[in-house]
Image: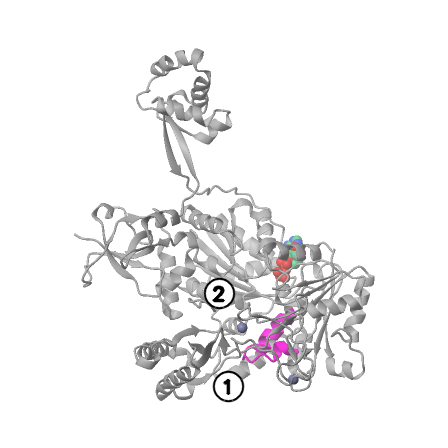
Amino acid sequence: MELYAEIILPIAIPPLTFKVAEELCGEIAVGQGVEVQLGARKLCMGVVRTLHGNRPDYKTIKTIRRILRSEILVPPATMRLWEWMAEYYMCSLGEVMRAALPTALKPSALTEEAFEKEIFKLRSETFVRLNHDIDTPEKLNTLLEPMQRRAKARYGAVMSFCAAFDNEKEVFGGEVPMSLLTADGVKPETIRTLARNNIFTLEKRELPPDTTTTREYHLRPLSEAQNSVFKHIENEFTTKPTVLLHGITGSGKTEIYAHLTARRLERGESVLILLPEIANLKQIGERLEEMFGNCVSVYSSKLSVRQRTETYLRMCHSKGGCIVVGVRSALFLPIPSLGLIIVDEEHDRSFKQDEPSPRYSARDSAVWWAVTHGINTLLGSATPSVESYFNSKTGKYGFARLTERYGNGALPRITISDTIRSAKRGERKAHANKELRDLIEAALANGRQTILYQNRRGFAPYIECPECGWTAHCPDCSVSMTLHKAENRLRCHHCGHVETIPTKCPRCKRGTPETRGFGTEQIGEDFSSLYPHAVIEVLDADTATTAAKYERIIDDFEQGRTDILVGTQMITKSFDFPKVDVVGILNADNMLNYPDFRSEERTFQSIVQVAGRAGRKDSNGEVIVQTSQPVLPLFSQIASYNYEGMFRNQLAERKIFNYPPFGRLITVIMKHPNNELLSRCANTLVRRLSRRYGDMINGPYPPVVNRVRKVFIQEILVRMELGKAREMKQVVADEISALHSEEPFKRVTIFCNVDPQ
Ligand code: ADP
Ligand code: ZN
Ligand code: ZN
């Protein structure tokens, strides 16, 4: 019988079927990586999805001639995850494969030679054994005798070889890594000479990854409150695959994760801990290594391609009892006997990939996996997403709550401070109200630290002509250029386009453009002139350009060498800084004014998260939130840590519009350099979909940034009722492929973002 293999290829097309060469039929397995030829010349790696005996009705069928690695790269449960993702997030399996495998495991090239170079190889080692005809001590002695006198080096090499065995019998037929002999002082040339003289035979082999682990845990005992939550979570897991842990900042969620992890390891299961993208993966990874030793693997984009690939392959060879800490893509690792996934800071939007496809949420995928594959998923946060909290209220998820800080510290006091009133009284300096400055000054006097949060980087968001209102815009994108004072230039944050600052307004030729708004860089500068003796640093995408710079800034602050740290979202992550007394949110309005139905939820989360950096160990922190709209209910909810209140308000609003959790959303994104053609295409799609779904189809409308690199963008929002999502996705997908086969619209790029965040 002939054997055929359905192969997933790392491109946006459905799997293709190939014939399996006869000599591979006994070896090939589902989940392996094989070499296939695409088109006339291209060679690439594909993953075997299924094996079967049905010849497809292609005219010519190509043959798979080589299995690239013997490991099962994609075990069955991971394959189901890929398939589910492709269906749910409306993309191809190839796109999932691209996200799932590290670069080195997806070789492709145009020539055999180049392809050979691309194929990943683990470290290899040369093994030494005695030639097979030297099979008795007598034969060996006959050879050694003359050597002992005339060839001392060679004699020494053979003696070293023999000494490597405990049992004399093993010398014949046994092997020793060459590195062991060279460590003994034997020269490699001597070993090669012995091989040429038919005394040794050498074999070079790839070494399997090191999967040995120490089974020794160093856990700290849980507090009474932590312990009862720990027990409660374990108990919830007996009836619910997913549990939400709502634990305030500083309550010691990490410690609970560690105890849950230890339980799983004892049962031989593995644990995956997912963290937000710019979290302090290093800090948490090290903390876990202290507790669990070398069964911890860290997986992030900061690692080299080789390190990531080795981790991937180590998972293929491991037997269970592993801990992986990583960002969203770690979900794709073939972790053996995975029993528990912990998603820390589950509300964080970086668990959703926006670009490129697959536009997947690692959190939601983990939950799906938990439900369908008997894995447990723990979602943890001090400020859960409205969706997850809703799911715990309706009983879909189990629930646990931790309401006290470890060591009985209090949560910092949050005060809402009115920027307009302060300005009227002439009390604002360096974008800070007097209330905030008083606290900063007290902290400086006491040798304590301050964090200032501003969710905009750069010196000022834009420049404006006071005479005619002209602002500098990027010529290729529909955004204003950001002023970066340190480089004295304007920069587009979407395409990187750079311009010099005009001295005269290019439009009216009269006014001198002035700076408007303020970002992290300007705040850093203004505070430096206000407090010349304080050490002030900025942490944002402009200053933390490399992992090393990022870590240096964090380390300086952690060690108390910096007095004031000004930062963007980067500082809201779960840092544990012992000496922070004061946190200032300089402008809560620009978070709130972001046009998105989640902006209030996000504002609540960001502020409560940064606030949590204050008052950790021995003092109560103070938090000042500056806004021009202090009367908004959201601010009193923030000031009293009233999560429930915020949740109820958001739920009421979302109910009206059928937004999540009451319905599901898809944004259809369309792109083309010709705006008129794009509009026609978008309107056609809306008309066709509306015929069926009426006002559940919204748009088309231009997004906040509607032109990037000279390409225009239009979006359509599809709102779906809960039970109808699957059907509507199919209709949307069909309409999109119909458009793609019609002449003027063929070249319009159209894709879907399911569950946009
Ligand atoms: P969260 O992630 O919930 O905000 P952390 O896990 O960072 O809180 O814990 C806050 C602080 O309390 C950390 O410094 C941590 O080391 C300490 N801590 C928490 N639980 C324990 C425990 N059981 N024993 C010792 N220290 C603990
Ligand atoms: Zn002007
Ligand atoms: Zn641009």
Most frequent secondary structure within the magenta stretch: helix
712 with respect to 603 (left or right): left
Of the residues shown, which amino acid type is indicated by label 2? Arg
Q: At 59% from the left edge and 74% from the top edge, which residue is drawn?
A: 602
The residue where tag 1 is placed is 656
- Does dot 2 land on a helix, a strand or a loop? helix
- Residue 36 in the image: state x and y as whole percent: 29, 54
The residue where tag 2 is placed is 363
378 with respect to 431 (left or right): left
Q: Nearer the viewer, residue 735 or 604?
A: 735
Q: Nearer the viewer, residue 290 or 51?
A: 51
Report the span colored magenta. Answer: 589-608
Residue at the farthest front position: 509
In this picture, is 334 found above or below 665?
above
Q: Nearer the viewer, residue 527 or 600?
A: 527
Q: Is residue 240 visible?
A: no
Q: Nearer the viewer, residue 433 or 74?
A: 433
In the drawing, what numbered circle is on residue 405?
none
Q: Quadrant of residue 138?
A: top left
Between the residue at mark 2 and the residue at mark 1, the CA separation in whole angstroms equals 26 Å
In terms of sequence position, does the residue under pointer 2 or pointer 1 come before the other?
A: 2
Q: Is residue 596 magenta?
A: yes
- Residue 513 in the image: state x and y as whole percent: 68, 79
Residue at the farthest right position: 445
